[in-house]
Structures are given as C-alpha cells and as structure tokens.
Image: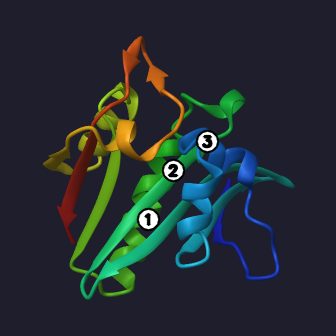
Amino acid sequence: MEIRKLNSEETPPYALLLLADPSKEMIASYIDRGDCFIAEKGKHIIGVYVLLPTKAETIELMNVAVAEQQQGSGIGKRLVTDAIRVAKEKGYKTIEVCTGNSSIGQLALYQKCGFRITRVDRDYFTKHYVEVIVENGIVCRDRIRLSQDL
C-alpha cells in the first residue's frame, strides 16, 4: 500500500469521502482548501484523508475513510500516522481531528494515535446536518474535538 497526495488534476474519491462525512455540501466546503491524500493498493484507492490548515500553526485532519472491504486491517491507523508525519514535516505545531460522539471506533483510533479530547461541540450534528446520523445504535449529536501537539 502506498499513500500519496492527490494531484490537482485528479478527482477526489467522493465515494470514500462520503463514508466519513455523509454531506456532499460539507465535503465541498473544505475539499478544495485542503490537501487530499489517498492510500492505493495496486490501481485501487482504498483510503483517504484530508489535511486542512485552520490557524497559523494548526492543521485539521479531516475525513479519514477506508474502503468498507478493507476496514479493520490497520489502514486507518496508517492514514492517521501518515497525516501526523505530514503535518510535522510542514512545520505545524498542533494537529486536530473531529468526530461524532457515536463514532466509537474512530474515537478509540485517534486516542491510540496520541490525540486527546479537547472540546465537545454540543448538538453540532443536529444543527449542521439535515439527516439524522446513527452509528453503533447511538444518535450522532455532538462533535468531539481531539488534538495532539507535534
């Protein structure tokens, strides 16, 4: 598996991006402002993440997604650790990531990769998404923000 930055002529893998963020409108609001990275196995794109600068020394890891048939094989962790590496190389001091209160697996992954919970944005998903999101039998209401010093 190889992870590389998507070049500007390539179309982002929307099918994968929609696995992590079900709103095409939300994806459209940040995809062109950040750098999109893809994980490839042969000619197949099996993972994606986006890095979006948010403040002078802070970058946000957004939209970490792995193809459904590849989930549970460590690709998500490799994507997150690659994002941390890229952020360090670019000179950022802090990397942030957000996920929903119902995203149990993602919360565990980010904490295993060194992120710590810094804030809860109550009712974020009920205010910003039209459709109700349910994961693991839990309604996704709150956005959990995690960060890591680089």
Identify the residue at image location x=46%, y=63%. 82
Q: Which residue is mark 1?
A: 83
Please tell me whether residue 97 is drawn above or below residue 107 in the rendered image: below
Secondary structure under the numbered disc 3 in the rendered image: strand
Task: Indicate the amino acid at tag 1.
Answer: Ala
The reply to whether callout 2 and callout 3 are in contact (CB within 8 Å) is yes
Identify the residue at image location x=82%, y=81%. 9
Q: CA distance from mark 1 to mark 2?
A: 10 Å
- In the picture, measured across the screen, residue 22 lies left or right of residue 60, that is right
Q: Which residue is mark 3?
A: 66
Which one is in front, 136 or 87? 136
Secondary structure under the numbered disc 1 in the rendered image: helix
The reply to whether callout 1 and callout 2 are in contact (CB within 8 Å) is yes
Q: Which percent across, then down, holds residue 102?
A: 35, 26
Q: Which percent across, then down, holds residue 56?
A: 26, 88
Residue 114 appears anywhere in the view:
no
Q: CA distance from mark 2 to mark 3?
A: 7 Å
Identify the residue at image location x=68%, y=38%. 67
Identify the residue at image location x=45%, y=58%. 62
User: What quarter of the picture does the C terminus occupy?
Assistant: bottom left
The reply to whether callout 1 and callout 3 are in contact (CB within 8 Å) is no
Task: Indicate the amino acid at tag 3.
Answer: Val
Task: Indicate the amino acid at tag 2.
Answer: Val
Q: Which residue is mark 2?
A: 64
